Amino acid sequence: MADQPPAPDADVNAIVGAALRDLAFAQPSPQKQFGYKRAAAAVLALDMQLTELMAAGGALPRIAGIGPASSRVIHEILDTGGSPTVERAVAASDRRADIERKRQLRQHFLSRAAVRRALADPSLGGPSPADYRGDLQMHSEWSDGNPTLEAIASACAARGYQYAAVTDHSYGLAIAGGMSMADAGRQRQAIAAVNEECAGRFRLLQGIEANIDAAGQLDLTDEEAAAFELVLAAPHSRLRRSEDQTPRMLAAVAHPSVRILAHPRGRIGGSRAGVMADWARVFAAAAQRGVAIEIDGDPARQDVDFTLAQVALDAGCLFALDSDAHTTDQLAYADTAIAHARLARVPADRIVNCWPLERLLAWLGDASLERAR
Ligand SMILES: [Zn+2]
């Protein structure tokens, strides 16, 4: 273990959040587990790094959800880079192997403070929030989301977007309230009505989040897929397997209607690694077809993250930076995606959300217009 304070550019809040989660899992009592998990969430949601907060006030400020035991862990990490308290608890725990496994599943996740720092850091290239014209993955009350289409349109317009795509789940994913094709037809009319209201100011697109099955096929026919303005393909099964699934992902990317490979791995922080594949090969195929690779900004997903985004960038890929919001408040998750794109130094021109509506629509109509040259 490191025995010096974390580097000035370290994501201290992510380190502390991970340590508090480890400590939570090492607790036999559900009540203590809950307390440390709540403390971890509070640290990960801070706007500023703990180091900056300490430097500003000389001491750790009072933070809701963080008690004396969690404060001790924070001080240990700020002083030495690690926490003997957490290590002792983990070593004594009968869940040690499980905790070690969870640790491996928290790589390259950014805390909120790290997201904000990446957005503000002028030394990073990549898109600024001002370059971002619209969000291309979100869920409404038509599947497993909460907001109405009207609420989505006004929240997106209030964020300064020129367009957004509602991408409810298709009917194959019943667990997520997948939308039947009859419902999709009614939703299309409802979207047209919203667009009439917003004419000239904002445009809502009808997308669909299609599910990629075990063989790489989508859960809707080619004809059904072609009825949507935007088709995202995303894996929601076989996300905890160690075998290679490159052929599955290549098949999804080859589908004629697919424009975005959404949360490509399907990973969840501290829980599962998602799909294992030869991503350089998958990304090369996507680049050749003009299919964008998504950076999903849901804090629990952050999929792909900035390290894998660099592989996609080298392959010549387009990118989509999306919130995957299920409430209008969660539209702010787009910031997390933008931060990863900045850390990977993805040029704004390669990001479909930074294009004017006309260019976006042209690509949606014919992906070959934007394939890697
Ligand atoms: Zn999904």
Image (cartoon, rainbow, N blue to C red):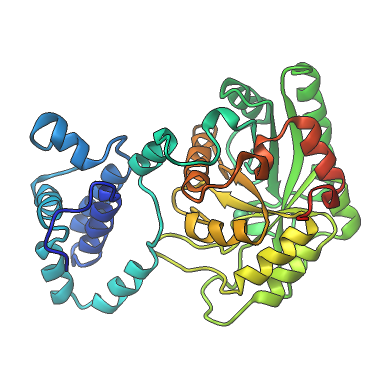
Drawn side of residue 237 relative to residue 165, left or right = left
Q: Is residue 347 visible?
A: yes
Place of residue 172 in the rendered image (x, y in percent of width and height, measured from the top left):
73, 60
Drawn side of residue 305 relative to residue 212, left or right = left
Residue at 30%, 47% in the rendered image? 41
Q: Quadrant of the C terminus?
A: bottom right
**139, 313: nearer the viewer:** 313
The quarter holding residue 65 reads top left
Work out which residue is located at the far bottom of the displayed protein and give it: 243
Residue 68 versus residue 77 in the image, above or below: above
Place of residue 77 in the rendered image (x, y in percent of width and height, measured from the top left):
15, 54
Residue at 68%, 25% in the rendered image? 162
Residue at 81%, 31% in the rendered image? 358
The quarter holding residue 133 reads top right
**131, 263: nearer the viewer:** 131
Residue 134 versus residue 265 in the image, above or below: above
**172, 248: nearer the viewer:** 248
Q: Is residue 142 visible?
A: no
Residue 145 versus residue 305 in the image, above or below: above
Q: Quadrant of the N terminus?
A: bottom left
Residue at 14%, 37% in the rendered image? 54
Locate ligand 1 by image quadrant: bottom right
